[in-house]
Structures are given as structure tokens and as C-alpha cells.
Amino acid sequence: MYLLSQIWLHLLMACVAGAGLGAGLRWFCVRRSQARAMEQARADADAHRLREVQALQASHAQELSSMQERHSVAEVQSSQDLAQRDAELADLRELHGALSQEAAGHLERAQEQRSAWVQERESLNGRLQEARQAVQQVQAVQTERDELQQQVHALALRVDETLRIGQEAQATVLAQQRAVHEAAWSQSEATLAERDQRLAEQAVELSSQMRRQTAMAAELDSLRWRLAQQTDAEQQLKAGAQREVEAAAQREQGLSSELQALRHSLEANDEQLALQAARLQQEQARQSSLEATLADCRQARSLLEEQAGRLRSEADALRAQVMQLRDAEARAQAQLAEAQSARPAVSPLATLSAEALEPLVMAAGAGLPPPGRAQPVDGVLDDLKIIVGIGPVNETWLRQQGIWTFAQIASWNAAELAWIAHHLPNFGSRVYRENWVAQAARLAAGEPVETAARH
């Protein structure tokens, strides 16, 4: 009776254990599937983030390269344009300088020729003035000669009149005397003597008049000789003045022809200067246009430089973003490496079956506590209830011991399993009978929950 009751009791316990084992397996499979899905989601998220970072980095690098190429091309084009415009401006300035020097030379030569012509004209004017003065002197001499001729003529008339008057007076006197003599002839001898005396006086007076007449004739001859000499000198002066006037007229005519030629030359030079001035104005207008174009190019260059500065700033910002992404990628890789390095190695017990694992755990006695962590690494913790045999109570107790992940359980050895089996609140033997180490190793490796539970 006692044996039968024991058998029924064991059968009941086996049924209960089998039902619990099936539920636990189903729960373990579900948990394992969830853990694997979470792990896969995290891996996919990390891979997606890494691809996004790489794509963004490649896009930034390509955009930065394109902007650098555009900027380099723009700088080269701007430099070429500026060099070409500078060369054209230098040529225009050189041409302007040459034209200015040539115009200055023409102007200087024209001014020198004008100065020479003015000096020569002043000299000719001086000579002409001298000739005119000589002509005036000749005219004055002619006037003086005419006056002398008039004086000589007047003197000759006076002499003739004097002689006529004297002769008439003498004839009158002689007639009177003859009448008186004839009338008084019969008078006395005294009267005759008186008459003779008067006649003698008259003869003296007549001789005196004759002498005066002779002196006046000599003076008249002298005046005539002087007049002839003055006439010869006047003719000579007149001939010399005429020759000088003719020579001055010839020189003036030559100078007039030279002046006309010089005027034509000046007009030609003025035309050339006008043409050169027009060319100079055209060159100045072209220079102004080129300077305006150069200013536009400089403004465009400044705009390009500003745009290049903005592009550099954007490139620097992109580089900073790339550096930040690289730093984030490096930190993520470091965290991943740290997490991978922090993940403990899988225990060899994960390859054993439950029957082979039990004697090892029993042989370990009380065992040793497994290493735990006060906090999960980066907040990563697994749902331990996926493992068959771990319920909410056991999971809470494992959390208190610093067990957070499947990898920690997968690294337990026999001593640690023995310690957990002795201290686990519920069903400590399930640690080795359901081989938590093997389940945790498969879940940590990413196998589906159902697959991990079937094993």
C-alpha cells in the first residue's frame, strides 16, 4: 500500500513536472525568439546606422570634392581672366604712353618751329622796320633837297630881282643924271664936279653891288654843287633803300612761302594730333571699358572668393560633421568592441548534455559565485526568462547577483553552476538538468528561441 502510494506520488510529480517542463519549454522558446529578434533588430539597426554613416560620409566627401573642383576651376578661370585683362591693360597703358610721348614730341617740335618762325619773323619785322626807316630818311633827304632847291630858286630869283632892280635903279639914276647933266650942263663947273663925285660914289656903289652879286653867284654855285651832291647821295640812298626794300620784299615773300609751308605742316601736324587725340580718346574709352570689365572681374572674383569662403565654411562644417560621424562611428565601434570584449567566453559546459553535466555539478560541491556586474553594460540586458527554467522570481534573483545577459550565463563553469543550484530560490536543480549554459550560449549566438529551446 505504501509502495503504491509512492508510485502514484511519483507519477503525479512526473506529470506535474512534464506539464511544467512543456510550459517552460514553450516560454523559453518564446523568450529566445524575442531575444534573438531583439538582438537581430539591434544588429540591423547598428548595420543600418553604419551604412547611413558611410553613405553620408561618402556623399559629404563627394560633395566636398565637387565643390573643391568647382572652386579650383573657378579660381583658375578667374586667374586666367585677370591675367588676360592685366596683360591687355598693360598693353593699353604702354600704347597710351607711346602715343602720349609721340604727341608730346610733335607738340614740342611744333612749338620749337613756331618759336623759330616767330623769332625769324620778328627779325624780318626788325629789318623791314629798318628799311622803312631808311626809306623815311630818304624821303626826309628828298624833302630837304626839295626845300634846298626851293631856297636856291628863291635865292636865284632874289639875285635876279636884285640885279634887275640895281640895273633899273642904275639906269634910272643914269637917266636922271643924264637929264640933270643935260639940263645943268650949261650951269656951272661946280655942278659938273658934284656930278662926277656922285657918279664916282655911284660907281663905287655899283662895284659894291657887283661884288655882292658875284659873291651871291658863288654862293649859288656852292649851293648848286651841294644840291648836286645831296641829289647824288639821295639817289644812292634811294637806290640802296630800293634794293633793301626789294631784298626785304623777296625775303618777306620767301618767309611768307616758308610760313605758308609751315602753316600747312602745322595743319598736317594738327590733323595728326587730332587723329592721335581721337585714337587716344578711343584708347582711353577702351581703357575705361577694360577697367570697368576688370572691376567687374574683381567683383566677380570677390563674389567667387566669398562663395569659396562660404563653400570652405560649408566644407569645414561638413568635415566637422564627418569628423563627428567618424567619432560617433569610432565610439560605436569602440563600444561594440568593448561590448564584444566584455562579453565573457562561452563555457565548455555548453556542449555537454544534461546527463553529462549533472555529475560535474554534483562533484563541485557548494561551488563558487559567478562574477556579476552592478549595472548592465550600456544599458543592454537580456530577457533571462526566455531560458527554460528561469521564471520571474529566479530572474529577479539573478539580477540581484549581477547577471544581466545570456553571455554571462553561457560562461558559467561547474563550480558556478553548483553555487547557483544551491542558492537559486526555486528549483535549483533545473540549472544543470535543463542546461542553462547551453541555452544561454545558443541565445547569445543569435539562434531563434525555438531552436535554442529544442536543444
Image (cartoon, grey):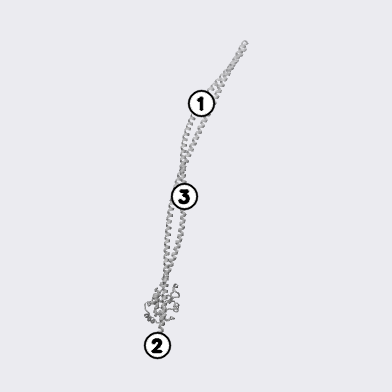
Query: Could you say where residue 251 lies in the image, as x and y percent from the top left?
Result: 47, 34
Indicate the secondary structure of the residue bearing disc 1. Answer: helix
Residue closer to the observer: 306 or 22: 22
Residue closer to the observer: 218 or 154: 154
For marks 1 and 3 on the same chain, the one whose residue lies earlier in the sequence: 1
For marks 1 and 2 on the same chain, the one whose residue lies earlier in the sequence: 2
In the picture, which quadrant includes the C terminus? Answer: bottom left
Residue type at tag 3: Ser
Query: Could you say where residue 271 lies in the image, as x and y percent from the top left?
Result: 46, 41
Point out the frontmost of discs 1 and 3. Answer: 3
In the picture, which quadrant includes the N terminus? Answer: bottom left
Indicate the secondary structure of the residue bearing disc 3. Answer: helix
Point out the frontmost of discs 3 and 2. Answer: 2
Q: Residues within 10 Å of mark 3 (few under 14, many from 20)?
A: few
Question: Label 1 vs label 2: CA separation?
Answer: 203 Å
Residue at position x 42%, y 65% from top?
55
Residue under label 2, please give it: 4
Residue type at tag 2: Leu
Residue 208 appears in the rendering = no
As drawn, 27 above or below 258:
below
For marks 3 and 2 on the same chain, the one whose residue lies earlier in the sequence: 2
Residue under label 3, please give it: 289
Q: Which mark is residue 231?
A: 1
Indicate the secondary structure of the residue bearing disc 2. Answer: helix
Q: Which mark is residue 349?
A: none
Question: Label 1 vs label 3: CA separation?
Answer: 81 Å
Residue type at tag 1: Thr
The quarter of the picture where residue 174 lies is top right
